Image: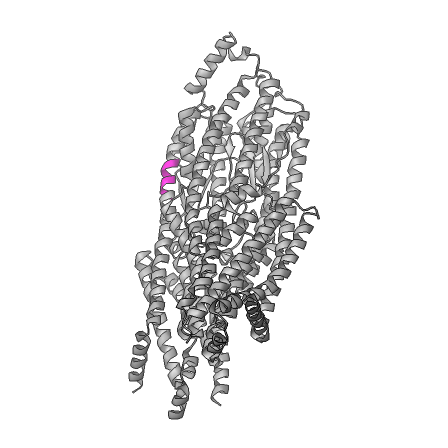
Amino acid sequence: MKKNRYHLEFKLFFRSSSSWIGIFVLLITGFAGLYFGKAFIAKQQAVIEKAATLQKKNTLNNIDHFGDDIGLVFFHNKFTLANAPDHWAAFANGQRDINPYLISVTMLGLEGQLYDTDINNPVSLLLGNMDLSFVFIFLFPLVIIAFTYNLLSEQKESGIWSLLRAQTNQSFQVIWQKFLVRVVVIFSVALLLLFVAMFYLTLRPDLTFLSVTVLILLYLTFWFALSFFIVSLAKSSNFNASALIAIWVLLCIVIPASFNLFLTRNYPVPEALQNVINQREGYHEKWDMAKEVTMKPFFKHYPQLKKYPFPEKKTFSWYWYYAMQQMGDDQAGASRLAIEKKLASRQYFTNIFALFFPTIQTQLGVNKMAGSDLDTHLSFQQAVRRYHEQIRLHFYPAIFLNQSVNDTDINDYKLQKYNRQEVPTIWMNILSVSLLTTAIIGATAFNLKRFNS
Amino acid sequence: MSNRINTIAKQTFKAAFNNSATLALTLLLGLSLCLATYVGWQNFKMQNNQRLHYKALVRAQWLAKPDKHPHRMAHYGYLAFREKHELSFFDFGIESFAGVSIFLEAHKQNTVNFSEAGFTNGMLSFGEISVAMVLQLLVPLLIFFLGYNSISAERESGTLKILLCQDVSWKQLLWGKTIGIISVCLSIFIPLILLTILLWASLSHWQISIDSALRLLLLVLTYAIYFFVISAITVLVSAFARSSKSALITLLACWIFFMVIMPRVTQAVGVKIHPSPSKIEFADAIAADVHQQGDSHDPNDPHYAAIKDSLLKAYAVDDVKKLPFNYGGYIMAEGEKITSKIYSKHQNELNKIFEKQNSLTTITGFLNPYLSLKNISMALTASDFNTFVDFQHQAETYRYQLAQKMNKLQIEKISNIKPGDEEKPLAISKANWAEQPDFNYHFKTLDTVLSNELLALSALTFWLLFTVILLQYSTRWIKTI
């Protein structure tokens, strides 16, 4: 009997054209999201491959042009580290459009090169990327609202509700069944898209896949709970639609957008501009100073380099030049740490704030798993620092001894790829979304009790 | 005739505010608008003051540099900061996504770095609340809530028939309802505009420029047209819909489609159709062109060898050291000329590609009034793509002039005979540095801005005409029952 009723509810649901429209909208935008998301990352991958061949070519060119002067070769030669995209990055492009994924640096001052951006169309950045996470976070809730807002009110407005109440004392069961049918349909569509994504984006069915799936299903549950809560208030269809859309606008647009404004206001980053100035002065002022102003702190920084004789008398030497460059970085050390501290406190504040807003929480969680968040970019920057330092220490002796470039292993330095070391976890995000969902379910249950009595 | 429209408009206005939910929503929106305005204004002041502070610091450091070789100064270079237009607190546009500082040095064109977006953790994909965002996105939603049942409710309650029997024409009804709904919007919009004018005037230290005043006036006008278009569409949908419910659902679906989904999709398609080169490809193409034209850093380059020969011939000397001016400076000036010309050519091509990518979104303005207003609003508040490109352009011009100024100083004032390996380097007096003026960005004037935005402006005009025609002539297809 009960099974039969579900069967009928499904039939009823699929007979309505608006149900099909909703499902089609999700599938079509979902596939579009997959396509554009993958195309975006595929382009980055192609560029990384191209950069590898270009680095090889440019190194040969530099040796060819400036080979007589080793200091000049390293003045020009760039070493590239690429933030190789994870397969998941196509699922959630995140910050990968804004932050550079290729950083090419010469052996000169790093602080003057590390923050160079990619060439981007700012309008594209403003309007945002189209990827599957966008469909899950913004569009699924809207279809959930469209499917559920009139569950009860429609029955009431068409007069069925009073008939039903007269015939059975389990009238609310009917609404509940209708609701479950919609949950099953939306979850199936979500799982179908995730399944397609698994093949199209070649995602491995591992813990990452599981946690993203759990997070997204929880997020959808949150919207179902919210929708059902509004339905349980037993107001008119128009009220429900208006209220739910207003909540969607608040959660998906107004609150995050206002938060951004406050973040900019409370955590400005003038340290970044200060850092540029510090680096520039730290290096350039040394040209007008006695050589020991540069060399003393330089040897203090690298006592192991003291054994290479410094040409004191020469007006210009590469030894002095690279040491001056190093001074730019050293003098920007404090402001560099200040930027890092400021970004960390921004991050902390965002994470606390996000705890209360599932939309932000889910977006941040998915970005984190996809490795397209700020944290991944900052660790990529750290990796560039380490790589740059390693290159400096490796080639300093050859430059300081004025050896021939051909005696160095510069040609062995190919484009390096940075892959993050550990897979992140998003327990906190999952926990916060499920707690908020539970709270709403609790409120709904309370409401229904009142409603039934 | 106009009397009746007036009566209906007044009635609609009053009815809207009698509804406590509408009143609450309107007040809430008004309040959040004032808050957005105030915080946006504060952010503007803080960010702009930071930039001005560092701008002054950079200038002072430039002037304080001691006597040295002019080419050292060319490498010391300049830091330029992108100043904000005083109206940009109204509409942030691409502000947060465009870089703030650019390092200008000899031989090398750098990127504009440190955009606000680079400091945030994906949160900016949700947008950033500004007055413009509220007016463009949320006020239409308010209009939809106010007006979805403006006609359909009259029909459902049976008052529509009575109204039409009493010699009220459909045209009067539609116009009256539209004007009534706009009046509700204006009750938020007008105080907001006054607040904006006040804050803007205080930003410009009470010395307002005609150009900005005209920009603001046009902003007010275009937003008013936008509200009219949205209100008219709402009333028309309500008139044509089967029921209030279907009117509401149609309007909400339109809102989501046109304001949330469409902008992303059109831009994504634009980017896909017109792919732009990556930074390394861009740099490689420039390097290839430079190599073909002649590389001043390459001692064996044929282009420079030819210059050398002709100079030796013209001055009838056998060694460049015997030339009456600094040969190195001359060669560098030539190199800078060639490379910067090539760079500018490539940069212009790149900007053309970006424009093509954006043009799809601009053209969709004819399908989507939101996008046309968004473009106009960004342009008028100088927070748009064109302003950013113009900043890059002016910065590059300044960079070129600085490099050539230093080359000229070298050609004229530096001896042609290189000092020995252990001798003091050649230098000129620090008094020369002041000859290089400070970098000041000049915003484009309004007429240039308007001519750039012709497409978006005609899209909005199209919408205005289209809705007026619909209000006037579509009435014959509306069903009374």
Q: Position of residue A266 (x, y in %)?
A: 62, 56
Residue at 55% over, 12% down: B323
Question: From the viewer's perspective, is A61 left or right of B125?
Answer: left
Magenta-drawn stretch contains A53: yes
> Hey, which quadrant is residue A180 in on the image?
bottom left
Q: Position of residue A74 (x, y in %)?
A: 47, 31
Q: Nearer the viewer, residue A167 or A119?
A: A167
Residue A361 visible? no
Count the numbered circles shown.
0
Q: Position of residue B185 (x, y in %)?
A: 57, 64
Q: Which residues are magenta?
A: A48-54
**Does B63 sit above or below residue B248?**
above
Question: From the viewer's perspective, is A178 left or right of B405?
Answer: left
**Does B439 sit above or below residue A422?**
above
Q: Position of residue A138 (x, y in %)?
A: 44, 63
> Hey, which quadrant is residue B436 in on the image?
top right
Residue B123 visible? yes
Residue at 45% over, 33% down: B345
**Does B19 sit above or below residue A206?**
below
Magenta-drawn stretch contains B423: no
Question: From the viewer's perspective, is A100 left or right of B116?
Answer: left
**Does B90 sit above or below residue A67?**
below
Q: Nearer the viewer, residue A362 or B195?
A: B195
Q: How is the image coloured?
A: one colour
Q: Nearer the viewer, residue B458 or A366?
A: B458
Q: Quarter holding the N terminus of chain A?
A: bottom left
Q: Hey, which residue is sitting farthest right in the picture? A: B206
Q: Nearer the viewer, residue B144 or B415?
A: B144
> Hey, which quadrant is residue A312 in on the image?
top right
Main secondary structure along the magenta-highlighted residues: helix
